[in-house]
């Protein structure tokens, strides 16, 4: 009869072990019993970059990379992008279910009431150089929030966790917009709590001397949809950073600063910025074949292509492509879209990309749409960090309440020298 176990024979000793399989996984700690002698260490699993290691049990986001499926708490991303709002989706991700009207109103109120930041934050931001990258400012400033809210250290108190959740979701757009205004030497624009989450962000970015900023409804909705698409993506590099740092039981602002820093890298949330710079460098459709050949020779990557999990179309990319047409109706077409479409066509017909299952990911088109909306390139990773805050918090909340979790501490396979005696400096061999 079939059993949910895995039998391992250790050929060094001839011993046989039977390990339970639960939810398609074996526990790495079960391998510890496999040893050659009682005083020898058991074997460990070696998995650089977590290619096939589950670090947690999660109920938040599901990805089927082979079939291009993305679900938040079971709901398909395409349906949420069409029917939901970012704040409703954030509630779903964090609390597990869609809210009823009363709960949504209360949630929206609680977040809206926390959009203002302490005035000292402005002084803190003024300390950055005039041309500081807004993402660097965001990383530092969100970490600095922990000094304003020392109560956040009480991570085992559900009420404290609830308040930090509201504060973080509410204040990230404010910090993000302030960092942009600083980088262009404009006075900070304060939050307008009459506006929607996305509308208020546009207000803080672009308000000039008018008494009341009125966002364009098409741009406001498009930004809200982009926020929905970026809200969570299970155990990616930054979510793993959030969990790993949070596992030390530090406050969520400090952990989230680390997650933001992870997102900044060009292989993660910095990719859309890199895509735009790549498209600008290619410059025209005629230069695409030469660029593709360069990538195939290993001289650089086709940014916005490839994914650790998706070996098919990224479903978020499909939504963004549709959204781009609506935005271009208002803003006029971004000429880079033609280069991007041609680049995608040529790459998808090329054996190099087919063989490696490299498809466009969410970042391939998101930069083009952000740019058409008037959002500057330096702000792209920041625009990713705002909605991803909902996902990072959900991952952190799940981790904090998971009784199986402890401080994250991987093992290593040590290959360095064995114990040896210290050599005085005059007796050390010459080094070249
Ligand atoms: N362009 C050219 N070749 C690529 C690309 C690319 N964008 N991505 C992967 N490859 C090639 C690699 O050279 C490698 O080829 P090889 O087997 O001949 O050595 C093969 O495909 C596998 O690539 P890995 O780097 O091993 O794949 P990994 O899963 O580690 O990397 C990643 C995934 C980082 C996303 C990678 O595809 C990449 O660098 N893409 C470009 C950056 C990007 O768009 N990042 C955004 C990701 S989505 C997000 O974070 C929101």
Image (cartoon, rainbow, N blue to C red):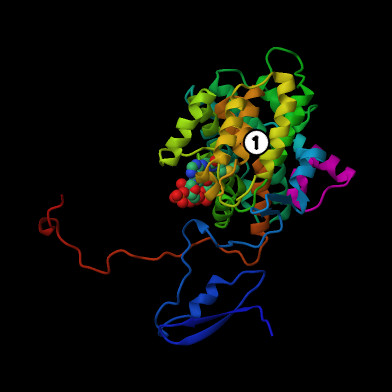
Q: Does residue 249 show up magenta in the picture?
A: no
Q: Residue at x 62, y 37 (%)?
A: 384
Q: Does residue 93 show up magenta in the picture?
A: yes
Label 1 packing within 10 angstroms: few (<14), some (14-19), many (20+) = many
Residue farthest to the right, as pictured: 101
Side (left or right) of 173 relative to 428: right
- Residue 188 on image: x %, y %: 63, 22
- Position of 25 relative to 109 (above/below): below
* Chain part drawn in magenta: 88-110
Q: Residue at x 49, y 56 (%)?
A: 49
> Pointer 1: what residue?
172
In which quadrant of the rendered image does the N terminus lie? bottom right
Q: Secondary structure at mark 1?
A: helix
Which is more toward the observer, 380 or 358?
A: 358
Residue farthest to the top, as pictured: 209
Q: Residue at x 14, y 59 (%)?
A: 424
Which is more toward the observer, 219 or 176?
A: 219
- Position of 142 relative to 8 (above/below): above
Most common secondary structure along the magenta stretch:
helix
Which is more toward the observer, 108 or 271?
A: 271
- Residue 324 on image: x %, y %: 70, 29
């Amino acid at each position: 009869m079939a059993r949910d176990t895995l039998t391992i024979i250790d050929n060094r000793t001839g011993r046989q072990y039977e390990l339970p399989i639960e939810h398609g996984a074996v526990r790495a700690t079960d391998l510890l019993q496999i040893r050659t002698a009682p005083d020898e260490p058991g074997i460990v699993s070696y998995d650089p970059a977590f290619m096939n290691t589950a670090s947690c049990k999660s109920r938040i986001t599901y990805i089927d990379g082979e079939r291009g499926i993305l679900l938040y708490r079971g709901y398909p991303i395409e349906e949420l992008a069409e029917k939901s709002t970012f704040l409703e989706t954030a509630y779903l991700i964090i609390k597990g279910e869609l809210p009823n009207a009363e709960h949504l109103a209360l949630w929206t109120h609680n977040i809206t009431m926390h959009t203002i930041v302490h005035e000292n934050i402005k002084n803190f931001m003024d300390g950055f150089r005039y041309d500081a990258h807004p993402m660097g400012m965001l990383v530092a400033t969100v970490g600095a929030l922990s000094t304003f809210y020392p109560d956040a250290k009480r991570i085992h108190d559900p009420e404290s966790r609830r308040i930090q959740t509201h504060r973080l979701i509410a204040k990230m757009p404010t910090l993000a917009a302030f960092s942009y205004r600083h980088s262009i030497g404009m006075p900070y624009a304060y939050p307008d709590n009459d506006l929607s989450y996305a509308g208020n962000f546009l207000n803080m970015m672009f308000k000039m001397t008018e008494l009341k900023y009125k966002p364009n409804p098409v741009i406001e909705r498009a930004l809200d949809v982009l926020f929905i698409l970026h809200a969570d993506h299970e155990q990616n590099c930054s979510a793993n950073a959030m969990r790993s740092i949070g596992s030390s039981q530090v406050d969520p602002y400090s952990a989230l600063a680390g997650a933001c820093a992870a997102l900044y890298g060009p292989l993660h949330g910095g990719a859309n910025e890199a895509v735009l710079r790549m498209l600008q460098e290619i410059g025209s459709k005629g230069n695409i074949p030469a660029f593709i050949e360069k990538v195939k020779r290993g001289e650089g990557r086709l940014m916005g292509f490839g994914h650790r999990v998706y070996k098919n179309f990224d479903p978020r990319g499909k939504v963004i492509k549709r959204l781009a047409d609506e935005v271009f109706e208002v803003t006029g077409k971004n000429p880079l879209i033609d280069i991007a479409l041609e680049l995608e066509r040529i790459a998808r017909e090329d054996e190099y990309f087919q063989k490696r299952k490299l498809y466009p990911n969410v970042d391939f088109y998101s930069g083009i749409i952000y740019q058409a909306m008037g959002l500057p390139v330096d702000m792209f990773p920041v625009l990713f960090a705002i909605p991803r805050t909902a996902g990072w918090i959900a991952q952190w909340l799940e981790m904090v309440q998971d009784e199986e979790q402890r401080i994250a501490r991987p093992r290593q396979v040590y290959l360095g020298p064995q114990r040896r005696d210290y050599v005085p400096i005059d007796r050390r061999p010459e080094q070249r």
